[in-house]
Image (tube, coloured by chain):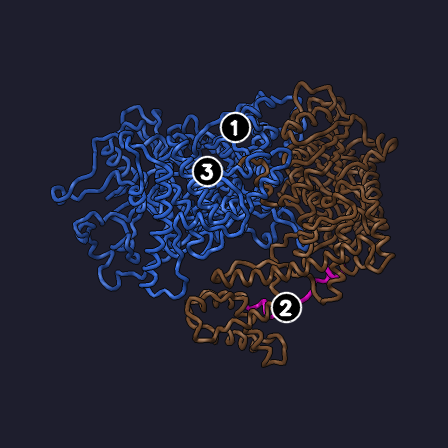
Chain colours: A blue, B brown
């Protein structure tokens, strides 16, 4: 229905595109800086049906750009407040807000399938990678975005063009060697990283990525309780201080002496008493509770507060802050201890990390940093402002129209095929709520979509925004070169045994399957002669849902009967790369009247061989074709004949699925442990990837401008 | 604590002094359409002081479809008032006022009205009024941004009579280490470090800062080569060997750094020609813009410093490098002290100018005259007109090697055939004929024709009314627009048919409609430029952005 308010829009878009806009369903992932802009743009771009997801709540520092939020909203969920703000302006728009992590199972493939286009407004690489993989699995076009300061980027992904993983992300990882963090720091960043690990060790539930995990036990021993068994926080804090900054440093010093490490000056142990006596001339801000700047932050006068924060604390002050943060945490927020993850918006967390990292810097002769700087480093804060977000969201919306034009083309094509009697492979109707379940993918490569790069302008440039034609995917891209197969079964109550026999071995013809879900083997092919000498982990009678699988989950299927030799590694001692593919499992009762009805929506496509083919071990010994040895024969009694554990492999679909189940995403959607520079609204990687020049010679014209006007 | 501060993230970009400039800025926007409100939204959020919206329009239902800052209940009421109300809700720090008048009548009756603002934005203002506003901004020395959006196409045009930037934030900054011209303290410190002495222990040796290593190698080189710098490949190799000869082990990271930064020892100290031009300009202080008084006074002091010393004040910052604490702090303080000394010299000159005791009474009087004329709230660094904030002097000295000055052409100059930038347009047009995607100049020409059409016909090309939207009318508008385009092109010495018909057809098809998507983009860029103009940081666009939203391309052209 065209309302008068959209007369202009209809005119500019033309009737067909306008109509398609009106019946489109969109998913916006993220309601932060870009998300707010985007939601507003979409509503005013004519879209009437939008889902928006965000796991975050509103912080004061969001208010300078996330314009759908006001001061009184602080602490409330971003997604629902954004929805309410827009709804009050545009009551006819259907917006569904979800508070949650996009990587939760409830938002998996089934959920994605209902949308025409997905728009990312994310702030971290992990979630971007995950959404990318689900969009590939469900064939949804994806419009990606990111900003850093004055720079930004929009990328259009889907069908026959590059996906998020196709472009090698350079200079994004800022990883530090384990020993650098643990024993030989020489930069402030190393100490900040160490302090973040320490924070989670003391107040959170550290996972295996925490380089200090083994310290947990030692710290526990420093706990000091009163006669009621209650922890005495200040004594505990004092013990911890002396352990971390004195005893451990003394040990480190001895080790260094033993190792005759002449290239670094010996570290200086620091006791709490010693620290309290040290004032190194950086002013005298009193009090361990940081009231130096808590007072006046009104009317642009965050400024004096900010200046106070840019002071570097003396060792004495650091010690006070350190003890203060620990006691405050135990005495006032005791119920949170054990659950916290570092948050750059949590003042005590920042105090703790600033103090701890500076104390460690003192130990190792490294320059101390101000609280302000530590917050930047620890929170991977990249400055975020309203203007850049607005530009990028505008670029996303322009591209959205162009994507929909291509969707329309594809739909016309499919209609034509349907009219010609071409039906789906097995003649079963597609998903009822699947917007586009055609077998052909949308084509974007010759569309008017552009990957757009917003540059920081200087006088030498003639472009502020570079619009680059989309390019074909990288043939060996781990994420999109082998999109997951797709099968639909009647329900998730199938037994694993039935599923493997009927679908995997039967229809998909995987002879000797090993099936993983969340990196966890749920089925390992058994050889007849081995039934009694090994534990059989398979539970053929268990239901798929009982094993944790859900409608729209992704599984990873390997075929032990089909492999190529690769360089043996620790993870893969036998040097075999098995043929494997991912597969989405949907449940839909309509696929069969009989109990075991199913449909193969998309056949498997094997993952590409590893990028650097190993020198064939086969030539020197066992031949892959001749005497194929069965896995167990070579294994040292362990089931190492299975394909190497998926962990660490850059297999986005399966590793993301793991992340989905395992959670592990921190505040703001930032994983605390991925050492990739990430900000509130953008991703550093984009900066490095900005091309010097756009591709030349694109022959686009405006003749076929925006509209297919009759 | 930082989280109490909603401006935390932006303070990390433009600093407290940038924020102060914003918090003192008064912005006037002519127009309350979607482009206007999208621009203002991004200025209200970061906290400008005051907002004035000038528009006589009342809210119509069509506004609801594209302007986020008007609501159903505003229909029939002043759009300036409605937009202001909703915009101010975004940030309680910002005050504002709505003036329900047309810009045309304001220009006629009370042009002094515009004197009170820091920046004037004209959104969708027809050419004639835009030109007049720009002239006014030239006269009153105000920054000005003109915005125009038609369908998926738009332009952003900046104007400032004189815009001085200290912090250009050039990302490829070479640094100011003075390796080739070490000052006395630096040189004597470097020479005091005896890298070849066997008494220096391994730890110390592996932590000699690379600056010291390079200075020593260069000294050695100059002793052998008549004081020259390495220039040929062989000489550079010799220099490298001098470094390697000092090295004890390939585990010494500081020596890796020295090799990596070696090139900085090959480049003789120079002052960028554009900086030199500013300093030359500064020597005659009269005739400069009152809103840049502080800039010119300090520039004059720096020019004097440069005449006397042959170099600019030292920037004084030392990058991170491998070093033990003692040597790093030592080196840092050497640079800092020298920089402070340089600032002190500049400061002394500034005071003598301000007090008129510099012996050049003419200049002193001129300075005082200029200062007395200062009335701009744009001035970010003065409290008393006889004093320049010391922080400003320090900042100037720190960035002296990359200061920049821009003088913009007026809209009148742009649009008059005898003063138009025909060469730039021609060059861009030639690029277009070679490759359609490499230039957006046809859109600029098409919009110029579109303005002529509106001026002559009194309505926008392709604008449909309820009664009259026949295809004949549209075809007629296309023909008329082609005629306008031919005249525009001919006047610019371009072929009469320089604008392909399809561009003109597309513009007519839009019928002058404003799209929110375009408004969002243009508003984002315009506010970004406004921030640059107000904070006087970064380099603002020179001077026009041509936005092609059909292909996500934004080209910058000086017109």
**Nearer-N-terminus badge (3/1):** 1
**Is A624 situated left or right of A111 in this image?**
left
Q: Nearer the viewer, residue A128 or B61?
A: A128
Residue A609 versus residue A597 in the image, above or below: below
Residue A27: x and y in percent read 49, 32
- In the rendered image, which residue does mark 3 sit on? A348
Residue B156: x and y in percent read 71, 42
In the rendered image, which quarter is residue A221 located in? top left
Q: Chain of mark 2?
A: B
Cα distance in 3D space between marks 3 and 1: 37 Å
Residue A477 versus residue B35 in the image, above or below: below
Label 2 crowd bin: few (<14), some (14–19), many (20+), radius 10 Å: some
For marks 2 and 1, give the one nearer the viewer. Answer: 2
Q: Are marks 2 and 1 on the same chain?
A: no
| Marking on residue A277 | none
Determine the secondary structure under disc 1.
Answer: strand
Queried whether the magenta region covers residue B272, the answer comes back as yes
| Marking on residue B183 | 2
Residue B132 appears in the picture as rendered: yes
| Marking on residue A50 | 1
Residue A299 versus residue A652 in the image, above or below: above
Residue A211 appears in the picture as rendered: no
Residue at point 13%, 42% (across, down)? A531
Queried whether the magenta region covers residue A119, the answer comes back as no
Residue A40: x and y in percent read 59, 30
In the rendered image, which quarter is residue B546 located in? top right
Mark 2 and mark 3 residues within 8 Å of each other at the beta carbon: no
| The C terminus of chain A, quarter of image | top right
For this orientation, the residue located farthest to the left is A532
Residue at point 38%, 50% (across, down)? A271
Magenta span: B262-277
Residue A620 versus residue B72 in the image, above or below: below
């Amino acid at each position: 229905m065209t309302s008068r308010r959209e007369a202009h829009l209809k005119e500019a878009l033309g009737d067909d595109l306008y109509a398609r806009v009106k019946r489109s369903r969109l998913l916006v992932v993220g309601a932060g800086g870009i998300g707010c802009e985007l939601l507003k743009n979409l509503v005013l771009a004519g879209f009437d049906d939008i889902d928006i997801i965000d796991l975050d709540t509103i912080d004061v520092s969001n208010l300078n750009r996330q314009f759908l939020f006001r001061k009184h909203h602080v602490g409330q969920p971003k997604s629902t407040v954004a929805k309410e703000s827009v709804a009050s302006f545009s009551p006819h728009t259907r917006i569904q807000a979800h508070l949650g992590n996009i990587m939760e199972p409830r938002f998996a493939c089934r959920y994605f399938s209902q949308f025409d286009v997905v728009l990312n407004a994310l702030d971290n690489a992990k979630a971007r990678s995950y959404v990318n993989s689900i969009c590939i699995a469900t064939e949804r076009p994806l419009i990606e975005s990111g900003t850093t300061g004055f720079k930004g980027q929009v990328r259009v992904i889907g069908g026959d063009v590059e996906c998020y993983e196709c472009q090698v992300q350079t200079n994004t990882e800022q990883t530090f060697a384990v020993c650098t963090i643990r024993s030989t720091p020489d930069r402030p960043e190393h100490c900040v990283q160490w302090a973040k690990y320490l924070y989670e060790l003391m107040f959170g539930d550290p996972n295996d990525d925490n380089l200090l995990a083994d310290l947990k036990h030692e710290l526990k021993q420093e706990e000091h309780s009163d006669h009621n068994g209650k922890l005495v926080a200040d004594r505990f804090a004092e013990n911890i201080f002396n352990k971390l900054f004195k005893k451990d440093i003394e040990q480190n010093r001895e080790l260094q002496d033993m190792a005759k490490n002449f290239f670094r000056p010996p570290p200086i142990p620091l006791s709490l008493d010693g620290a309290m006596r040290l004032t190194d001339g950086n002013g005298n801000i009193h009090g361990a509770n940081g009231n130096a700047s808590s007072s006046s932050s009104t009317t642009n006068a965050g400024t004096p507060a900010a200046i106070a924060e840019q002071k570097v604390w003396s060792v004495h002050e650091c010690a006070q802050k350190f003890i203060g943060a620990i006691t405050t945490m135990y005495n006032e927020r005791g119920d949170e201890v054990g659950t916290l993850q570092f948050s750059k918006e949590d003042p005590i967390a920042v105090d703790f990390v600033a103090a701890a990292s500076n104390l460690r810097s003192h130990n190792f002769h490294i320059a101390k940093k101000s609280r302000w700087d530590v917050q930047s480093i620890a929170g991977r804060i990249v400055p975020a402002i309203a203007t850049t977000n607005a530009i990028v969201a505008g670029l996303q919306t322009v591209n959205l129209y162009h994507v929909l034009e291509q969707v329309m083309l594809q739909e016309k094509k499919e209609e034509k095929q349907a009219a010609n009697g071409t039906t789906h492979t097995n003649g079963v109707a597609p998903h009822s709520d699947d917007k586009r379940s055609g077998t052909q993918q949308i084509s974007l490569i010759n569309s008017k979509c552009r990957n757009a790069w917003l540059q920081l302008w200087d006088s030498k440039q003639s472009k502020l925004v570079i619009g680059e034609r989309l390019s074909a995917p990288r043939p060996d891209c781990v994420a999109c070169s082998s999109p997951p197969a797709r099968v639909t079964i009647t329900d998730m109550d199938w037994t694993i045994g039935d599923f493997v026999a009927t679908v995997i071995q039967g229809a998909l013809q995987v002879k000797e399957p090993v099936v993983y879900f969340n990196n966890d083997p749920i089925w390992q092919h058994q050889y007849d002669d081995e039934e009694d000498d090994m534990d059989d982990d398979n539970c053929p009678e268990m239901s798929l849902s009982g094993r944790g699988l859900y409608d729209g989950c992704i599984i990873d299927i390997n075929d032990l009967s089909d492999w190529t030799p690769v360089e043996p590694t620790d993870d893969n001692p036998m040097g075999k790369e098995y043929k494997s593919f991912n597969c989405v499992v949907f449940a839909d009762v309509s696929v069969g009247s009989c109990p075991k009805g199913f449909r193969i929506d998309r056949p498997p496509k094997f993952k590409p061989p590893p990028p650097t083919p190993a020198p064939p071990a086969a030539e020197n010994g066992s031949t892959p074709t001749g005497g194929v040895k069965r896995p167990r024969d070579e294994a040292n009694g362990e089931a190492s004949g299975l394909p190497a554990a998926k962990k660490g492999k850059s297999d986005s679909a399966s590793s993301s699925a793991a992340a989905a189940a395992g959670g592990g995403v921190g505040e703001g959607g930032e994983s605390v442990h991925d050492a990739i520079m990430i900000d509130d609204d953008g991703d550093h990687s984009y900066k490095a990837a900005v091309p010097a020049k756009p591709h030349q010679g694109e022959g686009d014209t405006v003749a076929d401008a925006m509209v297919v006007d009759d | 604590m930082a989280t109490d501060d909603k401006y935390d993230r932006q303070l990390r970009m433009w600093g407290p002094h940038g924020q102060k400039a914003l918090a003192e800025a008064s912005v006037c926007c002519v127009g309350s359409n979607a482009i206007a409100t999208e621009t203002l939204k991004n200025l209200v959020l970061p906290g400008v002081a005051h907002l004035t919206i000038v528009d006589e329009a009342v809210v119509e239902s069509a506004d609801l479809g594209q302007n986020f800052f008007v609501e159903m209940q505003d229909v029939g009421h002043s759009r300036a008032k409605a937009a202001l109300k909703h915009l101010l809700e975004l940030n309680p720090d910002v005050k504002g006022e709505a003036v329900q008048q047309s810009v045309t009548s304001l220009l006629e009756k009370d042009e002094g009205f515009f004197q009170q603002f820091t920046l004037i934005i004209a959104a969708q203002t027809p050419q004639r009024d835009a030109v007049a506003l720009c002239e006014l901004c030239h006269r009153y020395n105000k920054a000005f941004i003109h915005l125009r959006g038609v369908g998926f196409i738009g332009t952003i045009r900046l104007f400032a009579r004189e815009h001085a930037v200290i912090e250009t934030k050039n990302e490829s900054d070479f640094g100011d280490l003075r390796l080739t011209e070490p000052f006395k303290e630096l040189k004597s410190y470097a020479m005091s470090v005896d890298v070849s002495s066997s008494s220096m222990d391994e730890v110390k040796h592996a932590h000699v800062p690379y600056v010291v290593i390079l200075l020593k190698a260069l000294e050695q080189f100059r002793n052998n080569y008549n004081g020259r710098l390495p220039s040929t490949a062989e000489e550079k190799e010799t220099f490298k060997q001098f470094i390697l000869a000092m090295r004890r082990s390939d585990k010494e990271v500081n020596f890796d750094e020295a090799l990596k930064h070696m090139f900085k020892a090959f480049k003789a100290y120079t002052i960028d020609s554009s900086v030199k031009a500013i300093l030359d300009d500064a020597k005659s202080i009269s005739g400069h813009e009152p809103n840049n008084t502080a800039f010119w006074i300090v520039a004059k002091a720096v020019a004097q410093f440069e005449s006397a010393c042959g170099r600019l004040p030292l920037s004084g910052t030392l990058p991170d490098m491998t070093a033990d604490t003692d040597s790093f702090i030592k080196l840092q303080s050497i640079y800092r002290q020298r920089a402070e000394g340089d600032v002190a010299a500049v400061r002394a000159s500034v005071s003598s100018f301000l007090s008129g005791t510099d012996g050049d009474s003419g200049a002193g009087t001129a300075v005082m005259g200029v200062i007395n004329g200062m009335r701009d709230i744009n001035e970010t660094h003065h409290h008393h007109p006889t004093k320049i904030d010391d922080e400003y002097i320090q900042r100037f000295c720190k960035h002296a090697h990359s200061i920049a000055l821009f003088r913009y052409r007026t809209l009148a100059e742009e649009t008059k055939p005898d003063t138009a930038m025909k060469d730039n347009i021609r060059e861009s047009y030639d690029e277009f004929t070679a490759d359609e995607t490499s230039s957006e100049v046809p859109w600029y020409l098409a919009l110029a024709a579109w303005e002529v059409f509106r001026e002559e016909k009194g309505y926008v090309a392709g604008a449909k009314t309820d009664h009259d939207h026949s295809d004949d009318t549209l075809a007629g508008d296309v023909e008329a627009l082609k005629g306008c385009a031919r005249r525009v092109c001919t006047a610019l010495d371009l072929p009469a048919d320089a604008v392909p018909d399809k561009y003109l057809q597309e513009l007519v098809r839009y019928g002058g409609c404003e799209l929110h998507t375009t408004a969002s983009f243009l508003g984002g860029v315009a506010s970004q430029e406004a921030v640059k103009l107000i904070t006087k940081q970064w380099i603002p666009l020179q001077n026009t952005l041509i936005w092609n939203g059909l292909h996500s391309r934004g080209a910058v052209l000086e017109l």
